[in-house]
Amino acid sequence: MAKNKDARPPIFAVSVVGLSGTEKDKGNCGVGKSCLCNRYVRPDADNYYSEHTSVLSTIDFGGRVVNNDHFLYWGDVSHRGDEGLDCKIQVIEQTEFIDDQTFLPHRSTNLQPYTKRAAATKLQSAEKLMYICTDQLGLEQDFDQKQMPDGKLNIDGFMLCVDVSKGCNRKFDDQMKFVNSLYSQMVKSKKPIVVAATKCDECVDQNLRDLQAFVTSKKNLILIETSARYNVNIDLCFNALIQQLDKTRGKPKTVSYLEAFKVQ
Ligand code: GTP
Ligand code: MG
């Protein structure tokens, strides 16, 4: 059958998830979800921000970017396939925004705990704007204003981030407990999941080995070793998920963090 040249490229929505919450849950710093999204969507050094705060005032939580949700719309990326099969990837980050007065999670319309909420495949938020960086909050008019299309998205796949660095005031075992319960919710959706080991530039070998054991104990899970800081394997982890979403594409060759870092 002749291919319809005018056919629009398919669009896939990816939800980036991983341990989030108050300082009690996640320690002094996050696992790297925002940085991974930032590197994928806007990779160049001028548009990469290493800090994305989740502690917000009530005003910023209610602004059009956060829009009273615990998720962010990061915009979309045009993906050029090897065989010219293009597609678009819309990127969502599931996080938990903390009130800068009470240090408790902000109250959103969705009252489910993170592990349930982040596994959702239907997201809605009327007139929500694309997130760019922390400074944008409250100064939305000074930044590119792009809306989340139609105010809703259906999630096609998940990027599960697991921080394999030493972490700040957080035990790796506690992170894995959270990841296990998040995974058991996500798996119900039957959507493909790729595990991104984050902060591999500061990798603790034992943490990576424990994560490898978790991945091999599950069916159809792929692990990619990434560093958003040095932009290593960021495209690769999304490409691995795109291949799962569209099996007509060839599997990307997976390479370890060290191999990928060397060829940079
Ligand atoms: P929440 O959304 O608040 O749950 O956090 P998050 O998962 O989005 O984490 P975020 O991306 O904000 O990163 C938290 C901290 O880890 C920041 O200080 C980042 O600079 C740091 N970080 C993120 N990615 C990397 C990385 O690849 N390497 C190193 N060394 N640090 C990183
Ligand atoms: Mg974040």
Image: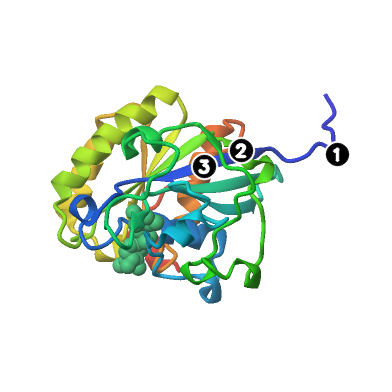
Give 180 or 206, whichever is nearer the viewer. 180
Residue at x 61%, y 55% (from the top left corner): 129
Separation of disc 1 and disc 2 at Cα? 25 Å
Q: Amino acid at mark 1?
A: Asp
Residue 114 visible in this rendered orientation of the protein: yes
Q: Which residue is mark 3?
A: 14
Tell me residue 82's x, y (percent): 64, 47
Q: Earlier in the sequence, mark 3 or mark 2?
A: 3
Secondary element at image label 3: strand
Secondary element at image label 1: loop
Q: Are marks 1 and 2 in contact (CB under 8 Å)?
A: no
203 relative position to 45: left or right: left
How many residues crowd mark 3 within 10 Å: few (<14), some (14–19), many (20+)? many
Tell me residue 219's x, y (percent): 33, 26
Q: Are marks 1 and 3 in contact (CB under 8 Å)?
A: no
Q: Which residue is mark 1?
A: 6
Q: Amino acid at mark 2?
A: Lys
Q: How is the image coloured?
A: rainbow
Secondary element at image label 2: strand
Foreground disc of the pair 1, 2: 2
Which image quadrant shows ligand 2?
A: bottom left
Q: Amino acid at mark 3?
A: Val
Separation of disc 1 and disc 3 at Cα? 25 Å
Q: Which residue is mark 2?
A: 152
How many residues crowd mark 1 within 10 Å: few (<14), some (14–19), many (20+)? few
Give 176 or 20, whichever is nearer the viewer. 20
Residue at x 30%, y 60% (from the top left corner): 200
Q: Earlier in the sequence, mark 1 or mark 3?
A: 1
State yes or no: Cβ of the residue under disc 1 lies below 8 Å from any atom of ligand 2: no
